[in-house]
Amino acid sequence: MLVSPKMLVASSCWVTNSFVMTILVCGQAIEDVNLPQRKILKMILKYMDKMFTVIFVCEMIIKMSAYGFKKYFTDAWCWLDFVIVIVSRYRHTTEA
């Protein structure tokens, strides 16, 4: 059976591991209790948060185009990606 290039990218171990690493980095940034006093770090993390949101949007688009819209929403991990993207986009549009 011939597999499409989009499906190869979406199911690649390298792509999956990259997104897992991104999630871990995001989680570590949240754990800093001294963040309010560190203005530069806070600015960097704000920029990185926007960058990670773009990465998650790209992941969602790649997987949605590879799996198809209907099959994309049958996978629980894809639902999690979708919720992360929606919540992140909502937070970015509502913050001052």
Image: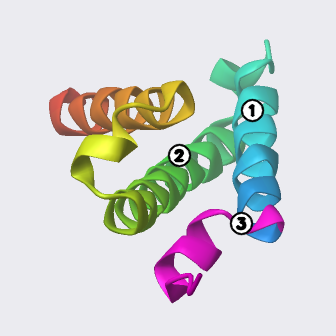
Residue 49, label in figure: 2
Q: Nearer the viewer, mark 2 or mark 3?
A: 3
Q: In whole angstroms, how far apart are the C-alphas of marks 3 and 1?
A: 22 Å
Q: Quadrant of the C terminus?
A: top left
**Residue under pointer 1:** 29
Segment colored magenta: 1-13
Residue 9, magenta (yes or no): yes
Kind of residue at disc 3: Val
Q: Quadrant of the N terminus?
A: bottom right
Q: Is residue 86 above or below residue 19?
A: above
Q: Where does residue 11 sit, x and y in percent of width and height?
A: 66, 63
Residue 87, percent from left and from top: 33, 26
Q: Is residue 75 visible?
A: yes
> Residue drawn 63% across and 77% down?
8
Q: Is residue 78 left or right of residue 70?
A: right
Q: Secondary structure at mark 1?
A: helix
> What residue is drawn where x is 37% and y is 36%?
82
For disc 1, the neighbor class at 10 Å (few under 14, some 14 to 19, many from 20) is some
**Is the Cβ of the residue at disc 2 closer than 8 Å to that at disc 3?**
no
